[in-house]
Amino acid sequence: MRIVFLAFVTSAIVFLTGINAASAKDYPYCIQGDDFAGGSGECIFSTSAQCQAAASGRTAYCADNRNFSANAQHIDKSRARRRSN
């Protein structure tokens, strides 16, 4: 029953945040463990609390996303660059 509940909660989080495989946004927290083999795990969490809730009751843990750059999320690439004289 716990596994079904956690699967439902995780699915709801993914659905409500609109995450898809081609998402360009990088998230600061990753879930890692037995279910998430393959290096860095799944980096789909904006907050540590979200990650901890998803890892609760599983053989999983949360870690910082080593590929996340907080400054890269705030760069407005659509703005034209101006030369300063």
Image (tube, rainbow, N blue to C red):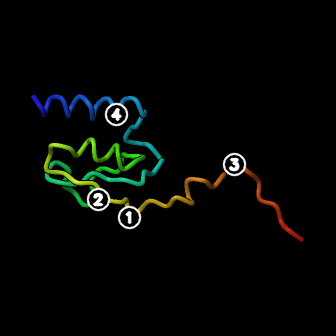
Viewed as shown, does residue 63 lie left or right of 24? left
Instruction: Using the image, tell me which numbered label, if any, was put on residue 78.
Output: 3
Q: What residue is shown with label 1? A: 66
Q: CA distance from mark 4 to mark 3?
A: 29 Å
Amino acid on which disc 4 is placed: Ile
Q: Residue at x 13, y 50 (%)?
A: 59
Q: Residue at x 34, y 33 (%)?
A: 13
CA distance for labels 2 and 4: 20 Å
Image quarter in which the N terminus is found: top left
**Front position among marks 3 and 2:** 2
Q: Considering the numbered disc 4 on the image, is that residue within a helix, a strand or a loop?
A: helix
Quick check: 74 above or below 85? above
What kind of residue is marked 2?
Answer: Ser
SS at badge 1: loop
Residue 41 locus on image (x, y percent): 27, 54
Which one is nearer the viewer's eye here, 69 or 82? 69
Secondary element at image label 3: loop
Asked whether disc 3 touches disc 2, contact meaning CB atoms under 8 Å apart, the reply is no
